[in-house]
Amino acid sequence: MTTISPHAASAPATAGSGVASVAEWLTTTDHKRIGRLYLGAGALLLLATGAISVLLGIERISPDREWLPVGSLTQLFSLQRFGLTYLVLLPLVVGVATAIVPLQVGARSLAFPRLAAGGFWLWLLGAGLGLFAIINNGGPGGGNPRFVELFILSAALVLAGLLATVVSVVTSVLTTRAPGMNMRRLPYFTWSVLVAGLGLVVALPVLIGNLLYLYISYRYQSLSELAGNRSLAQWAGFGFTQPTTLLFAIPALGLLADTVATATRQRLRPRGIIYTGIGLVGVAVFATVLQFPATLRPGFTSAAFGDQLSDLLPFLMVHGLPLLGCFVAVALSAKGLAAKPKVNAPLVFALFASLTLLGAVAANAVNHVGDAALGGTTFEEGTWLAVVFAGVLTAMGAVAYWGPKWWGRTMSAKATLPLALLAFAGAQLASLPLLVAGFANQPGGVFPSVENVQPGVTDLVVNFNYSGPMELWNILSTAGHALVLLAVLAFVALAMRSFLKGEAAGDDPFDGQTLEWATTSPAPFDNFAEVHIVKSAEPLLDLKPANRSDA
């Protein structure tokens, strides 16, 4: 394949007026700017939804005391689930992929750059309408029919915008690679983006189609108001829970492999098996396409052999293979750390993100074992939060790693490393106590399950009673949310200060191995002054005299 240079192009940045600079951002087709728009908007929405998560956590600490109006709980839980999934997790990952994948594959531009830019603005429009609808008693369980309709339509717009950008990124990987870069020579991060992107190209249209069906049914009163809200959870709930959301965090595994290779200054092997491990996580898409939970029924061990087989085969495919693949990818990447790596913040972020994702994939498998009786409890919510925070840690690590290619300046390692530790500790505190509380049958959030949108059930989510330290688990989870919020806020402030006034970065500040480090920092509008010929999976490493012998 050869690199392509699409005709759609905006002029390179100039030292013009402030108005001109804003206009350039609004009309940009530069993939680096489009990606940063996603990252910036996702970070702001993360801070907002993080604050809501803290409020909901406080409400759960004392089940016998109400801090928030009961009538607002359904909307707050819906806002948390919708916001953290499609306004934070997926946009952050898509933003990183959009900003860095063309650089990694040696392309001068993103394929279909106007499609990617249009996707961002469509996502932003849908996000605004969706938030407006939920605030006005729309969304799952909402009591205002007009705003329930608006929420369904806005959710479809959000997904359509993200899908447009994902299609552009996937097409870039398939069609704009530098000469000599076959599929076996893709950087690990680009491979993980391709796996996640292909899964999303298959999964998101299914969810969009369901939402449009619900919108038409609800709009033309073929469903009653209450039935419409139940149907929203029943027919679209699979898009807000596991295993669908596992697809969104797959790039964490690619970031880990890339940062391990960079930190050890060695070629990370075995490449094909790591590729396979990452690819197996994408098998989770079958559950989304078929809308089939693949659950082991209660009393599985005493069921007839035929019934056991009918449960076990889909369970192993949808939940077992992703768990195996995630473990293989993390284990083989972490094995490279035995080569005495130079520890840096991006590596720590990537390791924490991958471990968090591995825990989420394992918890998802447990959640679909019928005898565990975890349905409708906080166990699913804890698993979902682990996936979300795995994506957040990935985005933070990616900004620390590739920020020099976008802004030309580096973040202080001494200041960034403690934030990685703080964010990881917060992620574990936010999710693990909810897993434990799930085994105690504490009711979970209200969006994914049909039963949770029935009248009166929302109140049970914050009014419950069981033996054990109820307050302890919910205090720890709330503290975890607060720590993540604090870490993200500090990281955003540090990034803004570093990339505006920090130390200038060289072209290759981390001594990398892939093509993004072969161009200047910051990268120019068309990325590369010349097209690079790729001869191995580590093209930049080949150019370094000390490593030519092991090419």
Image (tube, helix red, strand yellow):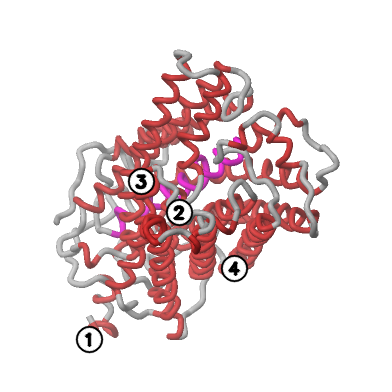
- Mark 4 or 2, nearer chain start: 2
Q: Secondary structure at mark 3?
A: helix
User: Residue farthest to the top?
Assistant: 220
Residue 388 in the image: state x and y as whole percent. Answer: 54, 52
Q: Residues within 10 Å of mark 4 (few under 14, many from 20)?
A: some
- Measured as percent of width and height from the top left, residue 54 is found at 71, 46
Does the residue at mark 3 contact the one at mark 4 (Cβ under 8 Å)?
A: no
Q: Are marks 4 and 2 in contact (CB under 8 Å)?
A: no
Q: Main secondary structure of the magenta part?
A: helix
Q: Residue at x 39, y 45 (%)?
A: 288
Task: Inspect the image, locate mark 3, and give the three-letter code of the amino acid beneath it.
Answer: Leu
Residue at which label 2 appears: 246
Circle 1 Cα neighbour tier, 10 Å, few/some/many (<14 / 14–19 / ≥20): few
Q: Secondary structure at mark 2?
A: helix
Q: Disc 1 designates what residue?
A: 549
Query: What is the secondary structure assignment of the residue under circle 4?
Result: helix
Q: Which residue matches tag 4?
A: 417
Query: Residue 211, labelled with which disc?
Result: none
Q: Marks 4 and 2, how far apart in space?
A: 26 Å
The residue indicated by pointer 3 is 200
Image: magenta residue range: 78-104
**Front one among 358 and 168:** 358
